[in-house]
Image (spheres, grey):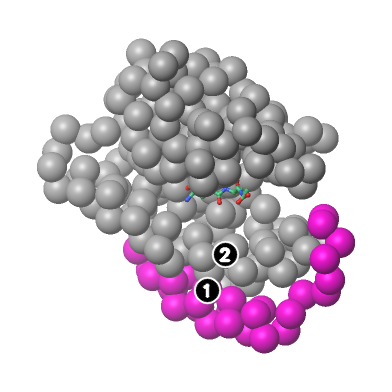
Amino acid sequence: MQLYVFPPSPNSLRCQAVANQAGIELELIPVDLPGGAQMNDEFVALNPNHKIPTLVDNDFVLWESTAIMLYLAQKGPGASLISEDLKERVTVAQWVSWTTAHWGPACRIFAFENLIKKILSIGDPDPAELARGKEEFALFGAVLNDHLKGRDTLVGSSVSLADHAAVSWLVHAEAAGLPLDGYDEITRWSGNILGTDAWQQALATIPGQ
Ligand SMILES: N[C@@H](CCC(=O)N[C@@H](CS)C(=O)NCC(=O)O)C(=O)O
């Protein structure tokens, strides 16, 4: 299986972490996003949204990181990442959806303003956007922090797609300037999840790591 990635992207890394936990070896194909390689005809034919990650499994093509995680979680020879318990399964879906709808967008404001703008040399952080980010982060960070009290994982007792999805936004927490002071439960949990072999192997694929 080939996974088209932009190595530092949280959306790529979460898929890689799931593949590692599921025991799937992926061939990683880097796509030069700053150079515009995602607009090449060959790539757009795979993903008309021109976005990574994109998975190719022989003649099957899949895009959207949450769908790719779900596929990899059920395809691997390793322990299944999908709980047999219906309520656990839908609660995982709840946290994955929440990450897509709320947590990711809140974190992305900081990543864009403090990190991506610098990398692409497209101007200084916009204080109004950072203020909006702080409001969003306060709202959704509190939800995550409160839920994690007394827990090591978001759902059940093993690391699930919920943890992989939500933690991916914390990979660049320091460089993005995420306002994590006081969110001790998030810091504890993310340190543990990002310290797992599955995440360490994924993070090792970022050039310069
Ligand atoms: N909802 C998508 C988001 C994917 C996404 O935003 N990918 C970005 C990099 S993190 C991208 O490929 N951007 C290139 C472009 O939009 O041209 C997913 O979860 O896979």
Residue located beneath label 1 in the image: 137
> x%, y% of residue 202?
60, 31
Q: Is residue 39 magenta?
A: no
Residue name at image x 78 percent, y 63 percent:
117
Where the C terminus falls, by quadrant? top right
Q: Are marks 2 and 1 in contact (CB under 8 Å)?
A: yes
Q: Residues within 10 Å of mark 2 (few under 14, many from 20)?
A: many
Q: Which mark is residue 170?
A: none
- Please tell me which residue lies in front, 121 or 38: 38
> x%, y% of residue 63?
45, 37
Residue 75 is left or right of residue 19, and the answer is left
Residue name at image x 72 percent, y 69 percent:
113
Q: Residue furthest front?
A: 41
Residue name at image x 82 percent, y 57 percent:
120
| Residue interval drawn in magenta | 119-147
Q: CA distance from mark 2 to mark 1?
A: 7 Å
- Please tell me which residue lies in front, 175 or 5: 5
- Please tell me which residue lies in front, 207 or 45: 45
Q: Is residue 70 above or below residue 183?
A: above
Q: Is residue 139 magenta?
A: yes
Predominant secondary structure in magenta? helix
Residue 196 is left or right of residue 161, and the answer is right
Q: Which mark is residue 107?
A: 2
Ligand 1 closer than 8 Å to the CB at disc 2?
no
